[in-house]
Each structure stands twice: as structure tokens, then as C-alpha cells.
Image (cartoon, grey):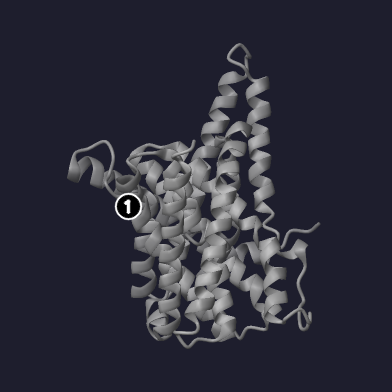
Amino acid sequence: MSINFQYLKSITPGIILALVFCLFSQGINNLLAIEIFGTPKSPISTVLIAILLGILMGNAFTPRSGMMIGLDFTQQYILKLGIIFLGIRLSFEELIKFGSIAIPLIICCIVGVLILVKLLIKKVPISSKMSYLIAIGTSVCGATAIVATAPVINAKKSEVAYAIANITLFGVIAMIVYPYFAEWYFDNDALKIGLFLGTSIHETSQVAAAGLIYDQQFNSPETLNVATVTKLIRNTFLVILIPLFAFLYNRGELKGQNYSILSIFPYFVIGFIGMIVVRNIGDQFFTPNNSSYDLWINLIGYLKTLATVFLTMAMAAVGISINLSELKSMGYKPFVVGLIAAVTVGFISLIYIETLTKFI
């Protein structure tokens, strides 16, 4: 298999730009903590600084097309690699524990949003195709779900763009606000906060970033673990919902539907679980009495650091790619539906978590 050096050359500038933003954001974080606030930790996390800097710079200066190729690569692949590396933090017991609690909550949120959006389009005049896209994007996995669903309901490019703009806008707002809201509302309860972040924020990248913001600000690795597991389980529901949406939209006639279960399955979930397997086997083999124990612990530390760096790079790339003027020009009606859907999924999550945790 030959290496495509031309492609590597084309993506390198954008990747380097994302890395520079990541390092610069960490520098600002350290400056805020040490020089300005005089505290061990800045009140603003590195991930949050990265995405805000990205939005600021991306809208103040138009990124060159050559940069966008690498930035897109960072959002699609380096992000997923960062999420895979997050698996090194977890045990099998935690995966099963968090997953068993999360699945009923995910189902409640998905069903609630689908019903709500179906009712809303009777009051807010938007196309049924756009309503389906907003519903699946809000309830499952953001832009990935929208792009995967669009062909099976024959959605127009403009409808896809509107739906993705919805997910981007409200997902980024939730990513910034929810970690601090959850800390106030749930009073530092890692399980509740992780479940809330994992079900109420749209994109996988946004959930991972929100969990990382919370971990960096409130020193809670478990919250990041719970949020990540919850979101990755939520992503797998795409395999069920896309065929369901195709059936509902076409009333079972199966026309114009070109989709494959294999093409829509989020394979990085397998990589995430694979890292959990590696961690658990390694912990059994490299015990404190083993001569390679220190090497194993250092490797775990390096992978955790890489996960943080890759996620921060991805958030910087997301920020640079957000065009505020385009969002403004799209009109308000789809955003009304998107806002209500986003608030609803958060409200359902809060109610469920409060009810569930009284019994566990």
C-alpha cells in the first residue's frame, strides 16, 4: 500500500494550525491561573479557550482553503483518535455500570425529542425533512446522524445545512454552559453530571469537550468517563433510527433509500472499547511487582495526555470552521425548533436522572 504524500502535504498545514491553537490555549490557561488569578487552576479550561479562540480567529480572518482540508481532517479523524484514547481511563466494570444506567435514559431522550419535533412542525412551518434531520441530530449524534439520514429521506442540501447549523450552534452553547450548570445543579455528583452531559449535548466532540472542561475545572475524571460512555452508547442508536426514519418518512415504501448498516456504524466505538480491553489486560499483567510496571503507568499517562491534546485540537478546528455570518443568514424558524428540541432533551435528562438516582 503506497503512501499518498500529496494528501499528507495537503492536510499538514491545518493540523499544525490546530496544534498551535491547542498549545496557545494551554499557555493562556497557565497565564490566567498563575499570573492573573494566582491560583493553581484557571477558571476557564484549555478546551473552552481553544474553541473560543477558534471562533474568534475563524470569523476575524477567513481561513485559506488549504488550511480547511487539515482542519476538516482534525475534526473527523484526530477527534475520533482522541476519543479512542479516552478508553484507556476505564475498566470493564465502569463500562457495564455506566452503560446499564445510561441506556434507558438515552431511549427516553430520543423518544421525547422525536415526539416533540413532530408536534412542533404543526406550529412552526418548516419541512418535514428538516424536522427529521433536527430530531435525529439532537437526539442521537449531531452532524454525523444528519448526514447519514439525509440520503434516505431525500433531503435537500439546504435542509442538511440548516440542520447542521442548528446542531453546531446549540451544541457549542451547551458544551460551554452545561459543565458549570451541572456542577451547580448536581453538586459535584460525577455520575449524574456525566449522564447529563452525555445525553443533553449533541455531538460526540462536544460531549467529550464538555466532560474534559468539567474534569479540568473540577478535577473529576469519572465525569468524563461517564459522559463518554453514555455518548458512545447513544451513537450506536443510529443503526436503529436511520432505517426507522426511512420507513416512517417513506411510509414503508422503501423508495430512494441507499443506506448500509455498515456505512453508518460508528466504528471508533470499537476502538474505544479496544482501549478499555488493553487497559484491563495491561493492569492484570503489569502489577506493581513487575519490572515493567513504571513503563506501563507512563504509557497510560501519555495516552491520557494525547487524548486531551487531540480533543483540544479538534475543538480549535471546530471553532475556526464556525461561520457566524452564515448562521445569521439562515433565518430563525428552524432554529426555534432546534432550540426547543435542545432544551427538551436537557429537561428530560434532568428529570430522569433525578428520578433514577433515588433508587440507586
Where 348 falls versus 131 (above or below)? above
Residue drawn at x 57%, y 75% as measured from the top left: 133
Q: For residue 82, say whether it is visible.
A: no
Q: Quadrant of residue 79?
A: bottom right
Q: Quadrant of residue 69?
A: bottom right
Q: Does residue 179 appear to the left or right of 223 in the view shown? A: left
- The amino acid type found where label 1 is placed reads Phe
User: Observer-nearest residue: 144 or 197?
Assistant: 197
Percent position of residue 37, x then y? 19, 43
User: Observer-nearest residue: 159 or 86?
Assistant: 159
Residue drawn at x 59%, y 55% as measured from the top left: 234
Which residue is situated farthest in the top direction here?
289
Q: How many marks?
A: 1
Where 34 falls versus 136 (above or below)? above
Which residue is situated farthest in the right direction here?
1
Where 6 falls versus 283 (above or below)? below
Percent position of residue 172, x then y? 41, 63
User: Observer-nearest residue: 215 or 106?
Assistant: 106
Write down the residue under mark 1.
181
Q: Quarter of the image containing the N terminus?
A: bottom right
